[in-house]
Image (cartoon, grey):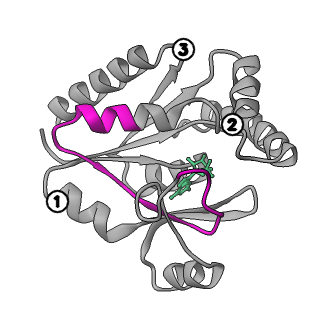
Amino acid sequence: MIGKLVVISGPSGTGKTSICNELLRRLPNGYWSVSATTRERRGDEVDGREYRYVTPEAFAEMVRRDELLEHAEYCGRQYGTPRKPVEDAIAAGKVVVMEIDVQGGAQIARRMPESIRIFVLPPTRETLEARLKGRRTESDAIQKRRLEQADGEIGFARQSGYYQFFITNDILEDSVDRVMEIIQQETQAV
Ligand code: 5GP
C-alpha cells in the first residue's frame, strides 16, 4: 500500500473512535494522528495517546508557527492536527488515520484533495442520544451541546460535498469492514 490520509468525521457518540481503534488494529501500516487540544482530559485518556493536551497559549503558538495542518474550535475548545508527523508518515508509506470534525475535514479536503474522507452516521438520532447519555464522563449541559452540534455537522457533511463516503455505524465490525474496503479500493486506484 502507498501512503494515504484517511479522515474520519462524525458527530460525537457515533462510535467513530471505536472504528478508528479497530482500523489501526487491522491496518499493518496504519498510523494514528494524535491531535492537540485545549479540552480537559476525559476518563482514562492518556496525554500523547488520544490527544496532546495543551494550554490555549501553547495552541495559539502552534497556529502562529503554522505547525497545524488544520485546526478548528469545537464546543468552545481548540483542536488541531500537528502537520509534521502526518507528512512524515505519509512519506513513509503509512495509512494515516485522523479523527477530526467537519470544519477540519473541509480544510483537509481543500489542502489534500487526494485524501479519503469518510463521515460516520448514527443509525438513528435516538441511538446517538443514548450513546451520549451513556458516556457518564460529561455533564448534561455538555451532552446537550454536543447533540445540537451533531445535527449541524450531519447537515454540513451532506451538503458540503467534502466527504466522498458516508457510513452508518450500526454494527462496529461491519463499519470497519466497509472502511477497510474503501481504503483498499482507494489505495489501489492510484
Ligand atoms: P472529543 O472532545 O469528543 O474528543 O472531540 C470533539 C470533536 O473534535 C470530535 O468531532 C473530534 O473528531 C474533533 N477533533 C478531534 N481532534 C481534532 C483535530 O485535530 N482537528 C479537528 N478539526 N477536530 C478534531
Look at the picture and state if 57 lies above or below 116.
below
Q: Is residue 26 magenta?
A: yes
Cα distance between the residues tagged 2 and 3: 18 Å
Q: Which residues are magenta?
A: 21-44
Q: Which residue is rendered at x = 60% and y = 50% of the image?
A: 43
| Amino acid, disc 2 | Arg
The spot of residue 33 in percent (x, y) is 37, 55
Q: Is mark 3 within 8 Å of ligand 1?
A: no
Cα distance between the residues tagged 2 and 1: 37 Å
Q: Nearer the viewer, mark 2 or mark 3?
A: 2
Q: Nearer the viewer, mark 2 or mark 1?
A: 2
Other-residue count near label 2 (Cα within 10 Å), few / some / many at <14 / 14–19 / ≥20: few
Local SS, label 2: loop
Disc 2 marks which residue? 135
The spot of residue 54 in percent (x, y) is 56, 75
| Amino acid, disc 3 | Asp
Q: Nearer the viewer, residue 147 or 6?
A: 147
Disc 3 marks which residue? 170
- The answer to whether residue 112 is left or right of residue 169 is left
Q: Which residue is rendered at x = 54% and y = 35% of the image?
A: 161
Other-residue count near label 1 (Cα within 10 Å), few / some / many at <14 / 14–19 / ≥20: few
- The answer to whether residue 42 is left or right of residue 132 is left
Local SS, label 1: helix
Q: Which residue is rendered at x = 70% and y = 16% of the image?
A: 124
Q: Quadrant of the C terminus?
A: top left
Disc 1 marks which residue? 91
| Amino acid, disc 1 | Ala
Cα distance between the residues tagged 3 and 1: 34 Å
Q: Earlier in the sequence, mark 3 or mark 1?
A: 1
Specify whether residue 163 is in view: no
